[in-house]
Image (tube, grey):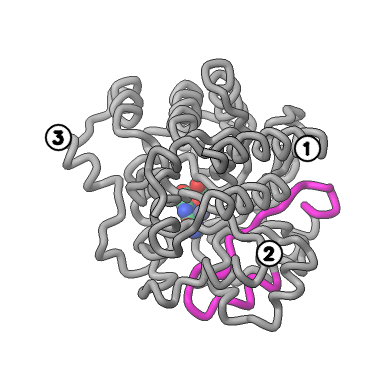
């Protein structure tokens, strides 16, 4: 088993982290104070509202937890602070590159526009980059329950916001009632506009077809993709196309993607050559951090430093950044992991 200090020293890439699901307790309190909003009296009560309990029965119950923080994320200032806070937490996990995702449409309850919501997050990411040794980019999520006419408003943001920190598009939310194929038009439009695409897919039992549809429609990464376990005949295609699976163990058990460790397919995928990566999904809702996710995988599968190095190179390959930045990250990680392996 790997020592926790060694895990802490490993440089990491995190591709799948939701802004609204990842606010620290201190940040939640700060945001409430800024807005004059009241919170439950004690820290324990606040966390009880913000975290998904062990007893969460499925993805939809997990998603209900986001209702608690969203009222706090309705101003430019608070979104900026929230983005800074999540990058700060990732830096503590020794994450060197992170993509943070959020659904702009969920932040318009006061008077922000879609553009302003995105700009606020980007500003927070940029400020955090000044203070920590990390690069942080943003992904925009559409929510699967949104009307298609609302989802269509998201793609023009990639034209109006020319900031290079806006790097990709995702569809999140209710996978139970909304199959990926329903979004064929918008996903194809994103692809035709050369927007990088990652899609939540294969997170619920019997949702494996969504993975195939997501890949066929142009996603180069899959959010979770746990149900790839049920389509072994498709693994060759996933490998050939270098599709990255953004897995998040704690979240995957909470949403009841899987209920027994023996069924968790992370190691099977890894051994078969699928490009698996490790992520938090939601630091607060899942009460985790990347250190804990790495620790779980190290304990469950006797993963070694070289295995973690490999999945980080997969993550770099899948990152929505220019080739030159990937080469730099690959080189840095190779050098840093070599030092850790030598010891
Ligand atoms: O694991 C997830 N699956 C599907 N949707 C998710 C997951 N985690 C968070 N979301 C949703 C809830 C958030 O409000 C939204 C944008 O971050 O994305
Ligand atoms: Zn997610």
Left or right? Give the position of 8 relative to 169. Answer: left
Give 267 or 165, whichever is nearer the viewer: 267
| Residue appearing at x 43%, y 47% in the figure | 282
SS label for mark 3: loop
Depicted 198 relative to depicted 338: above or below: below
State yes or no: Cβ of the residue under disc 3 lies below 8 Å from any atom of ligand 1: no
First in residue order: circle 3 vs circle 1: 3
| Residue appearing at x 44%, y 38% in the figure | 8
Q: Which residue is mark 2?
A: 183
| Residue appearing at x 60%, y 72% in the figure | 179
The answer to which quarter of the image holds residue 324 is top right
Between marks 3 and 1 in the image, the one whose residue lies nearer the viewer: 1
SS label for mark 2: helix
Residue 4 location (% of width, % of height): 37, 43
Residue 297 location (% of width, % of height): 44, 58
Q: Which residue is mark 1?
A: 327
| Residue 154 drawn in magenta | no
| Residue appearing at x 58%, y 33% in the figure | 96
* CA distance for labels 3 and 2: 42 Å
> Which contiguous range is marked in magenta?
190-213
Q: Which residue is mark 3?
A: 42
Residue 88 location (% of width, % of height): 46, 27
Whether the residues at callouts 2 and 1 have beta carbons within 8 Å, the answer is no
Depicted 181 relative to depicted 71: above or below: below
User: What label does residue 283 carry, if any?
Assistant: none
* Mark 2 residue crowding within 10 angstroms, few (<14) / some (14–19) / many (20+): some
* CA distance for labels 3 and 1: 47 Å
First in residue order: circle 3 vs circle 2: 3
Residue 89 location (% of width, % of height): 43, 32
Left or right? Give the position of 340 relative to 285. Answer: right
- Quadrant for the N terminus, please: bottom left
* CA distance for labels 2 and 1: 33 Å
């Amino acid at each position: 088993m790997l020592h926790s200090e060694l895990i802490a020293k490993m440089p990491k890439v995190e591709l799948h982290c939701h802004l609204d699901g990842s606010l620290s307790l201190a940040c939640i309190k700060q945001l409430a104070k800024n807005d004059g909003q009241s919170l439950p009296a004690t820290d324990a009560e606040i966390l009880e509202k913000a975290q998904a309990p062990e007893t969460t029965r499925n993805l939809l119950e997990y998603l209900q937890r986001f209702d608690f923080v969203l009222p706090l994320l309705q101003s430019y200032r608070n979104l900026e602070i929230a983005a800074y806070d999540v990058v700060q937490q990732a830096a503590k996990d020794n994450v060197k590159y992170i993509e943070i995702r959020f659904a702009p449409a969920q932040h318009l309850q006061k008077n922000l526009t879609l553009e302003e919501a995105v700009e606020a997050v980007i500003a927070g990411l940029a400020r955090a980059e000044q203070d920590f040794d990390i690069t942080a980019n943003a992904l925009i999520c559409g929510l699967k329950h949104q009307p298609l006419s609302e989802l269509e408003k998201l793609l023009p943001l990639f034209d109006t916001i020319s900031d290079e920190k806006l790097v990709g598009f995702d569809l999140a939310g209710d996978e139970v009632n909304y199959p990926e194929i329903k979004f064929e038009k918008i996903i194809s439009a994103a692809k035709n506009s050369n927007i990088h695409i990652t899609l939540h897919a294969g997170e619920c039992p019997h949702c494996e077809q969504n993975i195939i549809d997501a890949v066929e429609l142009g996603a180069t990464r899959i959010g979770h993709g746990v149900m790839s376990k049920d389509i072994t005949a498709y693994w060759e295609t996933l490998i050939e196309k270098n599709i990255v699976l953004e897995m998040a163990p704690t979240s995957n058990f909470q949403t009841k993607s899987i209920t027994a460790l023996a069924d968790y397919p992370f190691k099977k995928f890894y051994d078969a050559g699928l490009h698996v990566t490790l992520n938090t999904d939601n630091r607060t809702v899942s009460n985790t951090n990347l250190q804990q996710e790495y620790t779980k995988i190290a304990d469950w599968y006797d993963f070694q430093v070289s295995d973690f190095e490999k999945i980080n190179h997969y993550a770099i390959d899948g990152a929505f950044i220019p080739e030159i930045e990937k080469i730099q990250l690959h080189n840095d990680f190779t050098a840093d992991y070599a030092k850790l392996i030598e010891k």
